[in-house]
Amino acid sequence: MVNQSILSQDILNQKIITIIGEAFKLLNNQGDLLDGYASDVSIPKDDISKEIAKVTSLVIPDQVEPFEKSSSPLIQYVRSSTLHGNTETEPLLDLIKEVADYLPWKYNYEDRSDLGSYLGWAELIGPEAPFRTSEYCLGFTLISPNTLYPEHKHPATELYKVLSGTSDWTLEGVTTPRSPGDIILHPYNRVHKMETHEETLLALYTWTGNDVVTLSTYT
Ligand SMILES: [Fe+2]
């Protein structure tokens, strides 16, 4: 980990821009990998391809607010969240490792505040994120081992790319084990949940659509 005392805001911003660029590259490389996409969910591969194209054409916002040191209890899981990647996701995980302690980890839902010790996210781009825009969100979701992120939904369209850790993902009652490299689309207002087992989960996420401001509600 890099010591924050030698990590100026400018350097941190540069590292985050590199991470965002690498994240877009990872999504862009998805291409033929969708051939093996699990057919046990009712999401056409075309919809995933379209969402990837949409996300990777977005522009990184110019407006940058300072990163504040996170006091989230999730910090204790940050190290383990980068240990279970694969050859595809490791380049991005290596970049994340350098700044993981300084990302804006939080759990900002009013409901189930008890979950904030076990799961949350570091939003890099978004309405309240350091790289500020109301157009879309991009960040990392972290879920500690043996944790259920209960059923919830939101008006944004959500794209996930698993970076580290194998876990169970459920969309409208259909559960699929997901491993590093897997990509998952949650269309807007569709109920979904995730559950981890031995490994901490770290996944890249994006939110797009007409409303990326309204937070999730538990169902
Ligand atoms: Fe979601």
Image: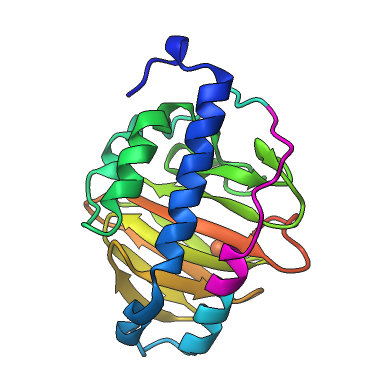
Q: Residue at x 30, y 55 (%)?
A: 89
Quadrant of ligand 1: it is bottom right
Q: Residue at x 77, y 63 (%)?
A: 211
**Nearer to me, 90 or 110:** 90
39, above or below 84, in the image: below
Residues in magenta, as a range: 52-65
**Residue 190's spot in the image, x, y percent?**
60, 76
Q: Residue at x 68, y 57 (%)?
A: 136
**Residue 189's spot in the image, x, y percent?**
66, 74
172, above or below 201, in the image: below
Q: Does 46 lie within the magenta span? A: no
**Nearer to me, 134 or 215:** 134
Q: Does 58 lie within the magenta span? A: yes
Residue 68 as seen in the image, left or right of residue 62? left
Quarter that holds the C terminus: bottom right
Which residue in the rendered view is the most extreme toward the top? Answer: 5
Q: Is residue 200 visible?
A: no
Q: Is residue 192 visible?
A: yes
Q: Residue at x 50, y 30 (%)?
A: 72
Main SS of residues in magenta: loop
Q: Quadrant of residue 191?
A: bottom right
Q: How many marks?
A: 0
Quarter that holds the N terminus: top left
**Nearer to me, 99 or 21:** 21
117, above or below 144, in the image: above
**Residue 57's spot in the image, x, y percent?**
62, 65
Protein image colouring: rainbow
